[in-house]
Amino acid sequence: DIQMTQSPSSLSAYVGDRVTITCRASQGISNYLAWFQQKPGKAPKPLIYAASSLQSGVPSKFSGSGSGTDFTLTISSLQPEDFATYYCQQYNSYPLTFGPGTKVDIK
Amino acid sequence: EVQLVESGGGLVQPGGSLRLSCAASGFTFSRYSMDWVRQTPGKGLEWVSYITSDSSTISYADSVKGRFTVSRDNARNSLYLQLSSLRAEDTAVYYCARRAYGSGTYYNFHDYWGQGTLVTVSS
């Protein structure tokens, strides 16, 4: 199975900050990587697919990059509604696997 | 508007069974492959099962293989997950998720998720 890791596991930031989250795959997955946002008690919300493509309706303050084993999610200017947990997921091979999440909270 | 609504969760004893449903609306259900994904506080998000639009291809995580069965009824716009021989470690919120339209690895990502249904396995 492909193992996904994320760093940091949590971070505190101010409104308006630029935030970057890193995701690493245990083996190469090309660009078959997705990012999700999850708020407490809610389902994961898809943000990005193919490492850098925004899902429909997702604001452009979210961006993704990377290929192979190393990926990043960047939020350009953090807003109150962005405080949540973010997960990466690889869909290069079965079983589909998820990172452990990065919790972003208010500083 | 695309909607996925799970139901059927609840409290069940170890060794018991449960059938989860996912009612789809707002899109042509018969054209899309679907997944079940579960989430626990301890293990995080875990992919459970996959079924193609025509049910021709089905796959399972090793942790549920032989115990869970995925199926769908395209006439009823519904996806199902039959859970059997349940264990405490199957306790989780179960989500159904829609795959992007298309075939091949590029389309293996999810574009919509349901709100989830909680399964608790306990005596």
Image (tube, coloured by chain):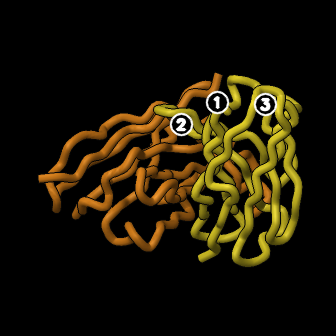
Chain colours: A yellow, B orange
Q: Quadrant of the N terminus of chain B?
A: top right
Q: Position of residue B63 (x, y in %)?
A: 40, 70
Q: Residue at x 51, y 41 (%)?
A: B74
Q: Position of residue B12 (x, y in %)?
A: 18, 48
Give the residue number, with chain letter if any, for mark 2. Answer: A43
Quick check: marks 3 and 1 in contact, CB under 8 Å?
no
- Binning the other alpha carbons within 10 Å of mark 3 as few (below 14), some (14 to 19) or many (20 upward) gives many
Query: Which of the 4 image quarters holds residue B20?
Result: top left
Q: Residue at x 22, y 64 (%)?
A: B85
Give the number of the mark in front: 1 or 2: 2
Secondary structure, mark 2, is loop
Residue at mark 3 to residue at mark 1: CA–CA distance: 33 Å
Q: Residue at x 24, y 62 (%)?
A: B87
| Discs 1, 2: same chain | no
Q: Amino acid at mark 3?
A: Leu
Give the residue number, with chain letter if any, for mark 1. Answer: B27
Q: Position of residue A18 (x, y in %)?
A: 85, 38
Q: Amino acid at mark 1?
A: Phe
Q: Position of residue A79 (x, y in %)?
A: 76, 25
Give the residue number, with chain letter if any, for mark 3. Answer: A78
Residues B56 and B24: in front is: B24
- Binning the other alpha carbons within 10 Å of mark 2 as few (below 14), some (14 to 19) or many (20 upward) gives many
Residue at mark 2 to residue at mark 3: CA–CA distance: 21 Å
